[in-house]
Image (spheres, rainbow, N blue to C red):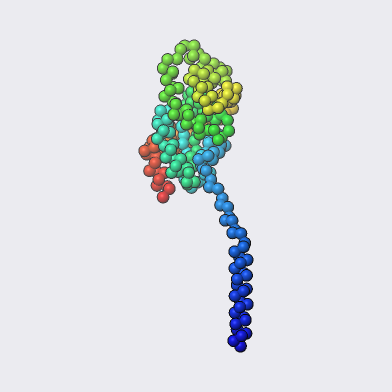
């Protein structure tokens, strides 16, 4: 009996050694690839309202911003809020920003046509460029000549917007962003878009109670008395908790 048990022990030891050797000889299984994390700061969608949405389209907190490009408060808001919104709101996937043009005058309209120029992915950089350089391109307004004012009254739509763009240095701003003159002229001549933007502005006044800029909606609710980053920030933070 002792010999039988000893023989069985030797066989088991040999079998275990073979199993261990086989396992050791197998290559280690590579870890399963993980899905790439979405870069929401590069996710831009153009909406049926001719606005642009930045971030997760399904974010639980949705901010709508009505802006006028000739509004100094809008330029100030952009400078104060952009980095903070991108880092703490957009990048997390918890928030999205939709920018809608609120057209107050021919200059507003001309800028809006240019910010919309090209694919949706270019919109937010165009938008930021005009707001951050607002003081520079608005400076010539104080010294317009009679000839320039006359050009701005041209009954031909494209001639009028191109005159404004030329006199205020818009071509140079956009050419520095990689656009060429023919492309810019096409965008400045987009009368159909201009008419839609004017209608969206009218709708904003009537439906969203917008009577100044910047104005905001948060999850579809107009924010009364909110015209600055200082007053908007705590309301966003409350909804992110």
The residue sitting at 52% across, 22% down in the picture is 171
Residue 29 in view:
yes
The residue sitting at 54% across, 30% down in the picture is 116
The residue sitting at 44% across, 18% down in the picture is 140
Judge by depth and name the residue closer to the eye, 3 or 164. Answer: 3
Judge by depth and name the residue closer to the eye, 213 or 201. Answer: 213
Q: Is residue 156 above or below residue 73?
A: above
Left/right placement of residue 62 relative to residue 159 reads left
Residue 54 percent coordinates (x, y): 51, 39
Residue 201 in view:
no
Residue 228 percent coordinates (x, y): 38, 35
Q: Is residue 215 above or below residue 164?
A: below
Residue 13 percent coordinates (x, y): 59, 75
Quadrant for the N terminus, please.
Answer: bottom right
Judge by depth and name the residue closer to the eye, 4 or 118. Answer: 4
The residue sitting at 56% across, 26% down in the picture is 179
| Res 161 quadrant in image | top right
Left/right placement of residue 232 relative to residue 16 reads left
Q: Is residue 72 above or below residue 153?
A: below
Residue 221 percent coordinates (x, y): 45, 42
Left/right placement of residue 57 relative to residue 216 reads right
């Amino acid at each position: 009996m002792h010999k039988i048990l000893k023989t069985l022990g030797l066989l088991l030891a040999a079998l275990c050694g073979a199993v261990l050797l086989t396992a050791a000889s197998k290559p280690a299984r590579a870890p399963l690839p993980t899905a790439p994390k979405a870069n929401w700061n590069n996710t831009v969608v153009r909406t049926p309202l001719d606005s642009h949405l930045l971030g997760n389209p399904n974010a639980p907190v949705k901010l709508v911003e009505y802006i006028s490009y000739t509004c100094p408060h809008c330029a100030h808001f952009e400078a104060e809020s952009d980095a903070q919104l991108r880092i703490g709101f957009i990048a997390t996937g918890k928030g999205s920003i939709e920018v809608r043009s609120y057209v107050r005058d021919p200059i507003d309209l001309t800028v809006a046509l240019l910010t919309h120029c090209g694919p949706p992915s270019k919109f937010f950089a165009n938008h930021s460029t005009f707001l951050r350089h607002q003081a520079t391109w608005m400076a010539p307004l104080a010294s317009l000549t009679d000839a320039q004012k006359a050009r701005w009254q041209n009954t031909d739509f494209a001639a009028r917007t191109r005159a404004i763009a030329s006199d205020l240095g818009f071509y140079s701003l956009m050419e520095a962003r990689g656009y060429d003159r023919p492309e810019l002229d096409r965008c400045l001549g987009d009368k159909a878009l201009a008419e839609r933007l004017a209608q969206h502005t009218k709708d904003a006044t009537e439906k969203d109670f917008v009577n100044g800029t910047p104005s905001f909606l948060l999850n579809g609710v107009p924010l009364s008395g909110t015209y600055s980053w200082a007053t908007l920030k705590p309301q966003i933070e409350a909804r992110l908790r």
